[in-house]
Amino acid sequence: MRVKDSIVVITGGASGIGRALAWRFTTESARHVVVVDIDADGARQVAAEVGGTAMTADVGIGSEVARVVDDTEAEVGPIDLFCSNAGVFIPGGVDVSTDRWQSIWDVNVMAHIHAARAVLPKMLSRGHGYLLQTASAAGLLSQIGSAPYSVTKHAAIGFAEWLAITYGDQGIGVSVLCPQAVRTPMTAGVDAGTVSAVDGMLEPEQVADAVVAGLGDERFLILPHPEVLEYVRRKTADYDRWLRGMRKLQARFPDASDVGRGPGRK
């Protein structure tokens, strides 16, 4: 799809990848950009910068996402592209409490479901629409140091796959964004010597460039770090060898919960 003349909604738009998308879509002549975030002040600031509209919502709550969709359609116009971009990180493994597992599940998985549930009927009635879902390379591979992040990002990709299979012949485009390390509030304090940045730390603007290119080609997988595709091929070619390699990588980075040093949002 082409962003030009489109009405775009971006969740997690107050910082990081979301803010970069808002700016990039504006330079691509989007008709209007709606910046959504739980951080009301941040959403207002970015919206003011790009001449868009700010909305506040907790994307883990279905009624709040539905309100964003309804208000956008009523006050701005029909949504062409919904970018479900908000995400959180929690380090740890089986020790993580059930409440914390639920909190990351609500944002990293249910937010995508809430968005699709709210916007898909409207897009289907018009015969076109596009969903961009921000996941992570961790959802294709794994996240050393965080079971909750790895599991929820795998689930997000699985949902995106299902959407593409189910609605791809009904005018609905679906792309899933799967970067490795990106310089955002989530990765505050992470440097190139950590497992999260083993292939380099991208700037959010570089990710936004990759998104525009991927949307233009209507590619399902958008991989700002191109190395990830080869890693996925190696994983599927020999799972046991891949697991051995991941254990070796884990041994190199015993303090691998480094991503969690920041505030934990994209």
Image: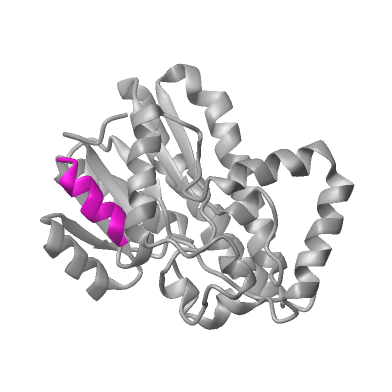
Along the viewing direction, whichever of 237 and 115 lies nearer the viewer: 237
- Residue 38 position by quadrant: bottom left
Horizontal side, residue 128 vs residue 255: left or right:
left
- Residue 151 position by quadrant: bottom right
Depicted 126 relative to depicted 246: above or below: above
Q: Quadrant of the N terminus?
A: top left
Horizontal side, residue 125 vs residue 191: left or right:
left
In reply to whether residue 146 is colored magenta, the answer given is: no
Look at 57% across and 78% down and name the residue there. Answer: 260
Look at 13% across and 63% down and name the residue there. Answer: 49
Q: Quadrant of the C terminus?
A: bottom left
Look at 53% across and 29% down and name the residue there. Answer: 164
Look at 23% across and 75% down and name the residue there. Answer: 41
Furthest residue toward top = 169
Q: How is the image coloured?
A: one colour
Horizontal side, residue 197 vs residue 10: left or right:
right
Q: Position of residue 213 (x, y in %)?
A: 35, 37
Instruction: Report how many numbered discs are placed on residues in the image.
Output: 0
In reply to whether residue 21 is colored magenta, the answer given is: yes
Q: Position of residue 177 (x, y in %)?
A: 48, 47
Along the viewing direction, whichever of 18 and 67 lies nearer the viewer: 18
Q: Position of residue 152 (x, y in %)?
A: 63, 57
Q: Looking at the image, can residue 10 be seen?
A: yes
| Magenta part, dominant SS | helix
Q: Position of residue 166 (x, y in %)?
A: 56, 25
Q: Which residues are magenta?
A: 19-29
- Residue 77 position by quadrant: top left
Q: Looking at the image, can residue 93 be seen?
A: no
